[in-house]
Image (cartoon, rainbow, N blue to C red):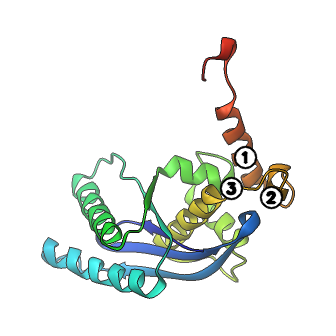
């Protein structure tokens, strides 16, 4: 199953493409950084990013897209560009019937490294290791996009009852931490109330 991870940005938009298999296996397919000129008209910049993404979507035909959720920043122009590109991604996905999953930066970090406050270097290191890459993906937008795709692959995986992932066999420490967190979130609290 082909999955995309998209790190939205108006100057640089990272697109990571992975193959997701059984047992939370994931393999690198490709990574792309779509770029637009900083001084150009915003509408033209969105067109350039959108056309590049549309071409990738039509070529790869992913089963799903993980999109980094826009979060508050001090720089309003940066957050606006990120939000605009996110809208383009959702529009193109909806046109093609591709489901989009929103992922926050802390969810991404927790999934990939097992620690929600990990820094970019730790995320890049784990993505490089998990995908068996010869060198870290650059720039950071590429690494983040691949991390989103891996996160989506791991979240999408549902082990059959009694399967390998049910007992933790073959999972990385980050995957095991995520599995424990998922199980803890499903456990009822005191007197049967949800936590």
Is the Cβ of the residue at disc 3 closer than 8 Å to that at disc 2? no
Quadrant containing the N terminus is bottom right
Where disc 3 sits, the SS reads loop
Residue located beneath label 2 in the image: 171
Residue located beneath label 1 in the image: 179
Return the residue nearer the eye: 160 or 130: 160
**Where is residue 91 drawn, in percent x and y?**
28, 66
Density class for disc 2 (Cα within 10 Å; few <14, some 14-19, many ≥20) is: some
Residue 164 seen by the camera: yes
Quadrant containing the C terminus is top right
The residue located at (61%, 17%) in the rendering is: 193
**Where is residue 13 drawn, in percent x and y?**
37, 72
**Numbered disc in front, either 1 or 3:** 3
Where disc 2 sits, the SS reads loop
**Where is residue 48 drawn, in percent x and y?**
25, 82
Question: Which mark, residue 116?
Answer: none
Residue located beneath label 3 in the image: 158
The residue located at (70%, 83%) in the rendering is: 134
**Where is residue 137 drawn, in percent x and y?**
57, 77
- The number of numbered badges drawn on the structure is 3
The residue located at (68%, 55%) in the rendering is: 158
Furthest-top residue in view?
Answer: 191
Is the Cβ of the residue at disc 1 closer than 8 Å to that at disc 2? yes
């Amino acid at each position: 199953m082909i999955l995309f991870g998209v790190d939205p940005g108006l100057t640089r938009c990272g697109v990571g493409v992975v193959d997701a298999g059984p047992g939370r296996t994931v393999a690198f397919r490709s990574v792309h950084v779509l770029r637009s000129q900083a001084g150009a008209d915003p509408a033209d910049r969105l067109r350039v990013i959108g056309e590049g993404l549309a071409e990738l979507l039509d070529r790869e035909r992913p089963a799903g897209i993980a999109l980094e959720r826009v979060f508050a920043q001090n720089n309003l122009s940066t957050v606006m560009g990120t939000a605009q590109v996110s809208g383009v991604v959702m529009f193109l996905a909806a046109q093609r019937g591709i489901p989009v999953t929103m992922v926050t930066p802390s969810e991404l970090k927790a999934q990939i490294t097992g620690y929600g406050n990990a820094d970019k270097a730790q995320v890049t290191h784990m993505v490089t290791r998990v995908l068996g890459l010869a060198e870290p993906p650059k720039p950071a937008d590429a690494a983040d996009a691949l991390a989103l795709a891996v996160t989506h692959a791991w979240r999408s995986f549902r082990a059959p009852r009694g399967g390998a992932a049910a007992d933790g066999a073959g999972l990385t420490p980050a995957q095991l931490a995520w599995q424990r967190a998922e199980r803890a979130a499903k456990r009822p609290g005191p007197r049967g109330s949800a936590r």
